[in-house]
Image (spheres, rainbow, N blue to C red):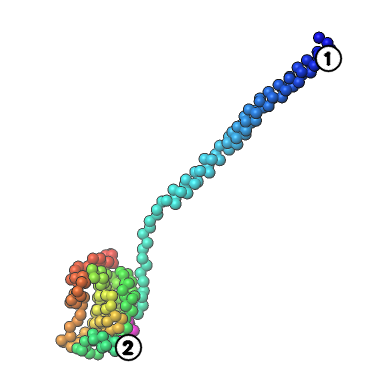
Amino acid sequence: MNKLTFSLILIGIFISYWLFSGSSAEITQAPTVQKDALIVNKNVVEADPLVVSSSSKPQIKIASNTTKEITQDVERTPQDIGEIASISDDAKEVLVEAGVLVKDISEEAYVEFNLAAMQQLEVGDTFDLTIPQTTEMHRAEVTQVDVFPNGDKSVFAKVTGSGNRFHNSVMTVGSDAIYGQFTVPSGNYVFESHGKHGWIAAKRDLYKNHVEHTPQERAPAEGAKDLFSPPINTQTTSKK
């Protein structure tokens, strides 16, 4: 073997060794990189193990709070609707034209009722009524409300009189009419209406043949519910 051949063999062995060493380094290094990546990820989790759990807990808590239904009993505040009737120059004409004005009344005063407000009366509410014939104004507090199948309301109230004495008032409020009585120290007054227009008269001034209209005496219209049915709902003040 000459020197040239021996030199070529050594060069070949060196090249083979160099190539083998480089490839094996790459092969062994790749798992090291993957291992390092796993170690890095593990360190992130281990560095703060509460990152996931602490962030998820508030979300679960919030979700549970949003799905929880909270019901509270809201107590209605009594309303003061003020004056329920005022003098009207048009009421008589409206009643005559509608054909509902009775002819056996005397010393009546024609008024316009606050029908919408009276339809909303509930126990505890207060209202005022000025008697046109005497110009005296009295305040009443609702003590009981009966609701009938046809939608009418019977409203009972106590009226403050002189010397803090109490008198009574009872009226039935329908969708288009009011019928009632209002007792004050000066006497008992009757009132009726067609829609919001009506009249007020002292009971003592009514003719003897006058027939007072009450919800129980009105014949039900065809297809309407029986007016003689008992109330379907009653509200009263609590007894002390």
* Quadrant occupied by the N terminus: top right
What mark, if any, has residue 119 been given in the picture?
Answer: none
Highlighted magenta segment, given as a residue range: 84-91
Residue 133 falls in which quadrant of the image?
bottom left
Q: Residue 181, how many percent across, how many down?
A: 24, 79
Q: Residue at x 37, y 67 (%)?
A: 77
Q: Residue 44, how many percent across, how many down?
A: 60, 36
Per the image, is 192 magenta? no
Residue 145 falls in which quadrant of the image?
bottom left
Q: Nearer the viewer, residue 25 or 124?
A: 25
Residue 108 falls in which quadrant of the image?
bottom left
Q: Residue at x 68, y 27 (%)?
A: 26
Residue 78 lies, with reference to residue 112, above or below; the image says above
Viewer can see residue 115:
yes
Graded by Cα atoms within 10 Å as few (under 14), some (14 to 19) or many (20 or more), the crowding at tag 2 reads few
Residue wearing tag 2: 90
Residue wearing tag 1: 4
Residue 147 lies, with reference to residue 105, above or below; the image says above
Q: How many marks?
A: 2
Per the image, is 88 magenta? yes
Q: Nearer the viewer, residue 226 or 6?
A: 6
| Nearest-to-viewer mark from 2 and 1 | 1
* Quadrant occupied by the C terminus: bottom left
Residue furthest toward the left? Answer: 209
Residue 97 lies, with reference to residue 31, above or below; the image says below
Q: Nearer the viewer, residue 163 or 105?
A: 105
What amino acid type is highlighted by mark number 2? Asp
- The secondary structure type at the circle numbered 2 is loop
Q: Residue 132, how many percent across, how many down?
A: 30, 86
- Mark 2 → mark 1, Cα distance in angstroms: 139 Å
What amino acid type is highlighted by mark number 1? Leu
